[in-house]
């Protein structure tokens, strides 16, 4: 009358068996993907992580908000006489600072990733070798853009009025993000050299604090003692601040922009191959 | 060179040194195409390090190897094109869903978007993961994670697959599922290099086995040869009434060799290579009125193989290695 239970199980496992066989039957390997396609796929992986854990973006949003409010209202009166006037000077500097601090997280993410088994799989694939790294840095551009947007929107809400309008702001943000790509490679290198994510975070912030504070982001260098002024004027962060301030004011020169692009290219040329070498020999 | 064509893996004198540890200390391997080859050894024997060298993740400090005819150092890119690796740590991305993991791999292997999606769906179905497809892998059970890991290795059919302890930590049901997958894969013609700590697993799946210890191959042969070299299996009998043990011992000694009283006062054991003779011995006990709580007829364990091959048990060393590894982790 009733169906034989053992037979039912048999036929179920038989269908499973057929599905398995079918899935395993020869799936030939297509030609390997291009370097660009592999990198974009890794970029997509980065985005998926943000999608699953949006809290990850908290550091990219909260820090810029804090910086902007703190500097505008704490130092605005003291440094420039009025908060409104100071904001006009400060905002490009805050933009640079916020985005640069976000690059440290690229290194932190890589250190976390490198301890996981999945990296072994990536390294055993026949893909363009730097693709996982290039993809990760590309994916991180989302964070950089989020940080930049937060700063600009908050700045405008507080009364920042860029002379060069929206176009100038977009150009400045683009320049800062390009420089951030270059700097991110420094932190990915550090990320592979250090063992723990918190060491990378601390090391990165220790390096960035002097670089951003000893720049023209917050004060005019002319107000500084001579030796410090020399340092500030040689500091690449100052060049970036000068260029983005110029772009927002509509006064940037090709030389200022070129200098920033050249330093981004130099950082990439040195540190991207270094990161790739370390990633390859990891394990 | 033409003589190499039937060998999927051919390694000579592979060495890898970490600091003062000679993790792999002159390993030779010859694995025929289309076979399953087991590498059997306790914790810290050097199994994973050997696999990582063959999969081009580590470069050897000495020696050389060819995988499907390609040199693992000079032609690493070609090797990567024909092998796939299921590592000891689950080599899947815990922060993505099962489906996303498979699509990611498919895209990286060159499938276009639509093909990648279709292939992911097919694999999820075949590996009984369809219901969990959209859950994050960090919430998967150990067995599901392993199946996903295997699926990720099979997005395109590899000619050779490295499997590093695929069933460690799995319950018997999940272990059987993994074994079924491996058998299906072999039927499709893939060569498999399987690292394991379980003689039982190597016996179930492998055509040939190399036993390694302290980075060296200490024995090689078919599962049957190894088991034979370890002496035989053993029969364990536990009695309902410990008082009957002397009687049971007398009866068993007539049938089998090496009868021993175990620490448990109700249990005794004997060596027994042949299941029929074991069954007969148990039947005789029961006919003579000795009441039996349970009995088992087992194959020699890895421990027993080790004892036979090296004169010392594997578990002891494994303990040391474990402790060492944990010390290193803690440091
Ligand atoms: N990256 C490393 N750095 C230092 N020592 C290592 C490294 N990898 C492995 N070792 C050491 O090399 C030896 C062999 O390790 P391996 O992981 O190959 O063993 P295994 O046979 O896979 O062990 P298990 O069964 O525990 O996985 C061990 O003593 C281990 O501590
Ligand atoms: Mg191992």
Image (tube, helix red, strand yellow):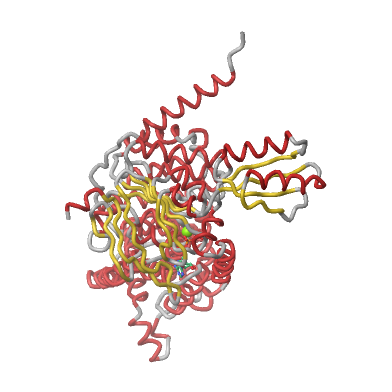
The picture places residue B74, in percent across and down from the top left corner, at 23, 63
* Residue drawn 23% across the image and 72% down it: A255
Is residue B168 shown above or below A96?
above
Of A14 and B288, nearer the camera is: B288
Of B307 and A182, nearer the camera is: B307
Residue that sits furthest to the front in the current view: B254
The picture places residue B22, in percent across and down from the top left corner, at 42, 72
Residue that sits furthest to the top in the current view: A1
Q: Is residue B304 left or right of residue A170?
A: right
Residue B157: which quarter of the image? top left
Of A16 and B133, nearer the camera is: A16
* Residue drawn 47% across the image and 45% down it: B203
The picture places residue B219, in percent across and down from the top left corner, at 42, 59
* Residue drawn 20% across the image and 52% down it: B3
Quadrant, the N terminus of chain A: top right
Q: Is residue B10 left or right of residue B185?
A: left
Is residue B78 shown above or below B251?
below
Residue A92 appears in the figure: no
Q: How many numbered marks are there?
A: 0
Residue B18: which quarter of the image? bottom left
Q: Is residue B61 left or right of residue B250?
A: left
Residue B141 appears in the figure: yes
Quadrant, the C terminus of chain A: bottom left
Residue B61: which quarter of the image? bottom left
Residue that sits furthest to the bottom in the current view: A226
* Residue drawn 32% across the image and 63% down it: A178
The picture places residue B136, in percent across and down from the top left corner, at 52, 44
């Amino acid at each position: 009358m009733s169906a034989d239970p053992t037979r039912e199980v048999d036929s179920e496992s038989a269908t499973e068996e057929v599905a398995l066989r079918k899935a395993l039957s020869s799936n030939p390997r297509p030609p390997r993907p291009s370097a660009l396609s592999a990198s974009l796929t890794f970029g997509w992986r980065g985005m998926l992580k943000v999608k699953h854990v949006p809290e990850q973006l908290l550091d990219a949003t909260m820090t810029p908000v804090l910086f902007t409010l703190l500097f505008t209202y704490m130092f605005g009166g003291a440094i420039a006489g009025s908060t409104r006037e100071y904001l006009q000077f400060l905002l490009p500097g805050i933009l640079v600072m916020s985005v640069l601090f976000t690059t440290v997280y690229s290194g932190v993410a890589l250190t976390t990733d490198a301890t996981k088994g999945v990296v072994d799989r990536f390294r055993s694939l026949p893909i363009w070798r730097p693709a996982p790294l290039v993809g990760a840095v590309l994916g991180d551009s989302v964070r950089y853009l989020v940080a930049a947007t937060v700063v600009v929107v908050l700045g405008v809400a507080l009364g920042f009025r860029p002379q060069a309008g929206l176009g100038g702001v977009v150009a400045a943000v683009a320049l800062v993000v390009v420089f951030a790509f270059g700097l991110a490679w420094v932190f990915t290198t550090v990320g592979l050299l250090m063992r723990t994510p918190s060491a990378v975070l601390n090391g990165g912030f220790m390096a960035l604090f002097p670089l951003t504070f000893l720049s023209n982001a917050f004060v005019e260098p002319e107000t500084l003692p001579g030796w410090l002024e020399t340092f500030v004027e040689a500091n690449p962060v100052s060049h970036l601040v000068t260029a983005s301030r110029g772009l927002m004011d509509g006064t940037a020169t090709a030389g200022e922009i070129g200098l920033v692009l050249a330093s981004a290219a130099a950082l990439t040329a040195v540190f991207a191959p270094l990161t790739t070498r370390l990633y390859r020999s990891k394990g | 060179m033409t003589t190499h064509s039937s060998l999927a893996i051919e390694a000579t004198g592979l060495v890898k040194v970490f600091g003062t540890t000679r993790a792999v200390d002159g390993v030779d391997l010859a694995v025929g195409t289309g076979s399953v080859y087991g590498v059997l050894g306790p914790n810290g024997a050097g199994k994973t390090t050997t696999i990582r060298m063959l999969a081009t993740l580590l470069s050897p400090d000495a020696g050389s190897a060819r995988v499907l005819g390609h040199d693992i150092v000079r032609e690493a890119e070609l090797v990567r094109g024909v092998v796939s690796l299921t590592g000891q740590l689950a080599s899947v991305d815990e922060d993505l869903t099962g489906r996303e993991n498979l699509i990611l791999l498919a895209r990286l292997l060159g499938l276009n978007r639509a093909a990648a999606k279709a292939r992911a769906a097919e694999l999820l179905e075949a590996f009984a993961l369809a219901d969990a497809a959209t859950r994050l892998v960090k919430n998967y059970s150990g067995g599901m994670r392993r199946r996903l890991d295997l699926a990720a290795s099979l997005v395109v059919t590899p000619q050779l697959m490295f499997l590093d302890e695929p069933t460690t930590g799995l319950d018997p049901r999940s272990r059987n599922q993994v074994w079924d997958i491996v058998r299906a894969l072999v039927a499709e013609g893939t060569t498999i290099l399987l690292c394991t700590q379980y003689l039982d697993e190597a016996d179930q799946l492998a055509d040939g086995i190399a036993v390694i210890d302290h980075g060296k191959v200490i024995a090689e042969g078919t599962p049957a040869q190894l088991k034979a070299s370890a002496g035989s299996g053993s029969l364990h009998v536990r009695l309902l009434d410990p008082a009957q043990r002397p009687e049971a011992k007398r009866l068993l000694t007539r049938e089998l060799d090496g009868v021993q009283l175990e620490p448990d006062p109700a249990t005794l054991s004997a060596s027994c290579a042949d299941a029929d003779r074991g069954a007969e011995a148990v039947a005789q006990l029961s006919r003579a009125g000795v009441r039996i709580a349970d009995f088992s007829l087992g194959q020699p364990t890895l421990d027993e193989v080790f004892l036979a091959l090296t004169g010392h048990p594997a578990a002891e060393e494994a303990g040391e290695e474990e402790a060492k590894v944990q010390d290193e982790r803690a440091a």
